[in-house]
Image (cartoon, helix red, strand yellow):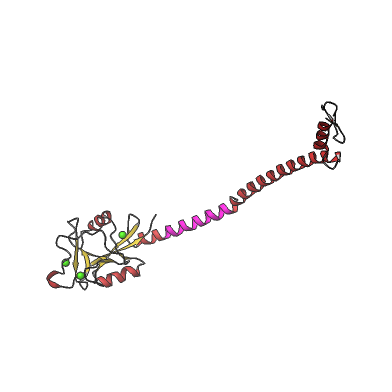
Amino acid sequence: MVYDKDESEITIEIGNFPDASARSVALKSYIGEDGEAATAVPGGKLHRYVAVSFCLLCILQAALNISLRLALSSPQNIDASCKNLTERDNLRRINFAHYFNQGWVYFHDSFYYISSIKKTWQDSRDDCLQRGADLIIINSKEEQEFTRRYKKIMWIGLTDRETEGVWKWVDGTPLTTSFWYFGEPNNYHGRNEDCIEIKYHDNGNSWNDVVCENENLWICEKKMAL
Ligand SMILES: [Ca+2]
Ligand SMILES: [Ca+2]
Ligand SMILES: [Ca+2]
């Protein structure tokens, strides 16, 4: 079999087939059962068209992928992200400056305010709330050690006012890690001691339960991660 260079005609050599039936099979497989020799050539072209079309589709897909990526990381999007970050950073700086200027101390992701006057436990808590904070919640040994540095008797945000003996922090979470002074809590002399003060600050375990109407200094906490 020989293809012409321009593929417009086909010449099929059938002289080498051993018998007539083999020639017939060879011819049918080439020409087709309906006897139209012309179908063989468009079929070959069709394959080429399909192959070329497939390649074009692949190129188109690749181009689409690239343009999508470019769109997602376009200068406008980067600008918007940077702007959001800058605004957030500015807000954070303003907040930090505000608390520092008001005399708050920063320690381990929180700001702390130590009062200079004495109040009852509830009034102390109200003062913290007005400052956008609450009485301190002591979550760790480090935070407990931090409170002892001041060597003052101060209210903390722990109480069993709701149910005697069930200690809760001001955010409603139960007490898990405690630092009671020896023999505390004790409702001393049968008093209704429902609020907690840091009293024995020379000792790692410094907490004492005391009557909530006593007046003490207090310590507020405002969580603010860097
Ligand atoms: Ca805390
Ligand atoms: Ca009590
Ligand atoms: Ca006590």
Tell which of 38 and 4 is nearer to you: 38
Q: Please say whether residue 123 is one of the residues in the magenta stretch.
A: no
Q: Is residue 187 shown left or right of residue 21?
A: left
Tell which of 159 and 58 is nearer to you: 58
Residue segment shown in magenta: 77-94
Identify the residue at horizontal 31%, vertical 71% (top origin). Answer: 126
Whole-percent x, y for residue 73 in the image: 58, 50
Q: Is residue 1 shown left or right of residue 51?
A: right
Tell me the quarter of the picture where residue 166 sits: bottom left
Q: Main secondary structure of the magenta part?
A: helix
Q: Please say whether residue 88 is one of the residues in the magenta stretch.
A: yes
- Is the residue 126 above or below the residue 104 in the image? below
Whole-percent x, y for residue 151 in the image: 20, 59
Whole-percent x, y for residue 204 in the image: 19, 55
Which residue reaches farthest left? 189
Whole-percent x, y for residue 26 in the image: 81, 33
- Quarter containing the C terminus: bottom left
Identify the residue at horizontal 21%, vertical 65% (top origin). Answer: 197
Identify the residue at horizontal 82%, vertical 39% (top origin). Answer: 40
- Quarter containing the N terminus: top right
If the picture is divided into quarters, which one holds ligand 3?
bottom left
Identify the residue at horizontal 79%, vertical 38% (top origin). Answer: 44
Tell me the quarter of the picture where residue 22 sits: top right
